[in-house]
């Protein structure tokens, strides 16, 4: 592919070679990948994409890898579900769920970013891959490293959900549980990254890693029949995913796949960790770091690296941001499960809760084509809902016991 031209500083524009670096040495701004869009425009087409692999790699022309060998060959192309029941409940004519609860191999959107990061890390000659994680990233790094035969170190906060801890250990990476929150983990990892020659996917490989999120924009547009949605709702941790969906939509226009982008970008956080949404709602273009306290642990970043850029993208798109309480997170998870049969993790509850709020406020209108990004699987955050779903009906193994519990007639009908 080799359509990647350079790394470029988002602040001062200084260019760098496409190595394992992430900060501008002139102004300390973050680096991002720059492409040769003229060249991509000449070779890319809707048909070429549709004839490509059934994964994120159908968009390889717009990803920061050389190819043609891709690690994480099955990430992406998750279902875009037409959510008729939830849409009717909320009063939306055309609502879709982008369902990354079934992403491969570790059931969250992080499989997209890790597939890109580990492919690039291998291309750059790394043998050890590492990350600072709120949970899902560690799971994905651990699984991809196992499959690629690479050594892995995953660093996680000390209070993660049981399934996310187990979802690391099973792949046998070096799992490092740090006594502290994600921001502590991240600070420590920045120091370690400076000392050891490892590929930290979200530190020195971050410019490449972050680009993987763009595939959520590409897939949405393709699955909508090459239409852009009017509104999207995106959960925010560092804010990277949100900024990259915005970037991805505009790239599709730049390379001639679509004519225009009219999408409004809406960001979602939990009240217990909402530095970005709080800044947006108070009309500031900078955020104040917070100490996270929420059940939405995958989003619990108190000092979000891309918070500033997320605020900027949302403002440019004329979108909005909001936050919901932990109780509303649980209600959101239940609502999505009970209307659409999709069991999301806490981040999904945040997205659905904020979607509901934005519809109530009139920010998202009945006729708006709306996509809600559901980024992680509910089986990984069972602690959040275990006390909110009741218990099974327990009976003896006899017909009498069953019929005493369920007052059903002989030919159906009735409910307990
Ligand atoms: C990491 C994560 C996000 C958002 O991540 P950003 O840091 O904002 O890119 C959203 N949902 C889930 C489930 C995640 O694990």
Image: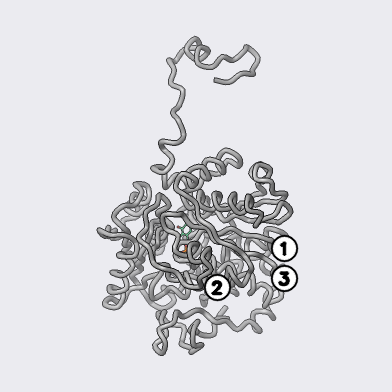
Is the residue 112 above or below the residue 67 in the image? above
The answer to whether residue 7 of the structure is visible from this angle is no
Q: Do the residues under discs 3 and 1 have CB atoms within 8 angstroms?
A: yes
The answer to whether residue 399 of the structure is visible from this angle is yes
Is the residue 259 above or below the residue 87 in the image? below
Where is residue 213 shown, x and y percent of the image?
Answer: 53, 66
Q: Quadrant of residue 273?
A: bottom left
Find numbered disc 3 in the image and state the secondary structure of the residue it sits on: loop
Which label belongs to residue 393? none
Which label belongs to residue 312? 2
Color encoding of the figure: one colour
Q: Image quadrant for the C terminus? A: top right
Find numbered disc 2 in the image and state the secondary structure of the residue it sits on: helix
Question: Nearer the N terminus, badge 1 or badge 2?
Answer: 1
Residue that carries the numbered disc 3 in the rendered image:
258
Where is residue 45 shown, x and y percent of the image?
Answer: 70, 72
Question: Nearer the N terminus, badge 3 or badge 1?
Answer: 1
Residue density around tag 3, few if under 14, some if 14–19, many if 20 or more, within 10 Å: some
Q: Residue at x 38, y 77 (%)?
A: 125
Q: Do the residues under discs 3 and 2 have CB atoms within 8 angstroms?
A: no
Which label belongs to residue 227? 1
- The yes-or-no answer for disc 2 within 8 Å of ligand 1 is no
Is the residue 405 above or below the residue 145 in the image? above
Q: Residue at x 57, y 78 (%)?
A: 1
Left or right: residue 370 compared with residue 100:
right
Q: Residue at x 56, y 14 (%)?
A: 407
Where is residue 173 shown, x and y percent of the image?
Answer: 31, 59
Find numbered disc 1 in the image and state the secondary structure of the residue it sits on: loop
Residue density around tag 1, few if under 14, some if 14–19, many if 20 or more, within 10 Å: some
Where is residue 18 shown, x and y percent of the image?
Answer: 46, 83
């Amino acid at each position: 592919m080799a359509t990647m031209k350079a790394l470029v500083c988002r602040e001062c524009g200084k260019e760098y070679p496409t190595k394992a670096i992430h900060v501008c040495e002139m102004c300390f701004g973050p680096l991002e990948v720059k492409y040769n869009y003229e060249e991509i425009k000449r070779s890319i087409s809707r048909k070429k994409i549709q004839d490509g692999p059934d994964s994120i790699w159908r968009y390889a022309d717009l990803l920061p890898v050389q190819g043609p060998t891709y690690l994480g060959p099955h990430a992406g192309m998750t279902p875009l579900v037409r959510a008729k029941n939830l849409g009717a409940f909320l009063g939306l004519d055309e609502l879709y769920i982008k369902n990354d609860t079934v992403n491969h191999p570790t059931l969250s959107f992080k499989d997209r970013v890790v597939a890109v990061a580990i492919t690039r890390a291998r291309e750059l000659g790394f043998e050890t891959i590492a990350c600072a994680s709120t949970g899902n990233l560690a799971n994905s790094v651990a699984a991809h490293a196992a499959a690629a035969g690479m050594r892995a170190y995953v660093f996680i906060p000390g209070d993660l959900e049981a399934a996310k801890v187990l979802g690391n250990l099973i792949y046998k990476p070096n799992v490092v549980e740090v006594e502290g929150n994600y921001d502590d983990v991240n600070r420590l990892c920045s120091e370690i990254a400076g000392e050891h020659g490892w590929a930290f996917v979200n530190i020195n490989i971050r410019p490449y890693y972050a680009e993987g999120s763009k595939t959520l924009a590409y897939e949405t547009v393709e699955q909508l029949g090459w239409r852009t949605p009017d509104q999207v709702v995106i959960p925010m941790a560092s804010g990277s995913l949100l900024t990259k969906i915005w970037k991805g939509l505009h790239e599709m226009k730049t390379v001639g796949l679509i004519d225009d982008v009219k999408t409004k970008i809406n960001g979602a956080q939990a009240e217990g960790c909402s530095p970005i949404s709080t800044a947006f709602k108070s009309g500031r273009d900078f955020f104040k770091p917070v100490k996270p306290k929420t059940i939405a642990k995958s989003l619990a970043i108190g000092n979000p690296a891309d918070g500033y850029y997320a605020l900027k993208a949302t403002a440019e798109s004329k979108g909005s941001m909001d936050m919901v309480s932990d109780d509303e997170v649980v209600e959101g998870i239940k609502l999505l499960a009970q209307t659409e049969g999709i069991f999301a993790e806490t981040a999904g509850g945040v997205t659905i809760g904020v979607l509901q709020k934005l519809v109530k406020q009139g920010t998202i209108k009945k006729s708006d084509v709306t996509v809600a990004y559901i980024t992680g699987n509910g089986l990984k955050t069972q602690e959040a809902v275990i006390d909110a779903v009741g218990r099974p009906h327990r009976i003896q193994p006899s017909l009498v016991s069953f019929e005493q519990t369920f007052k059903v007639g002989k030919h159906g009908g009735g409910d307990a």
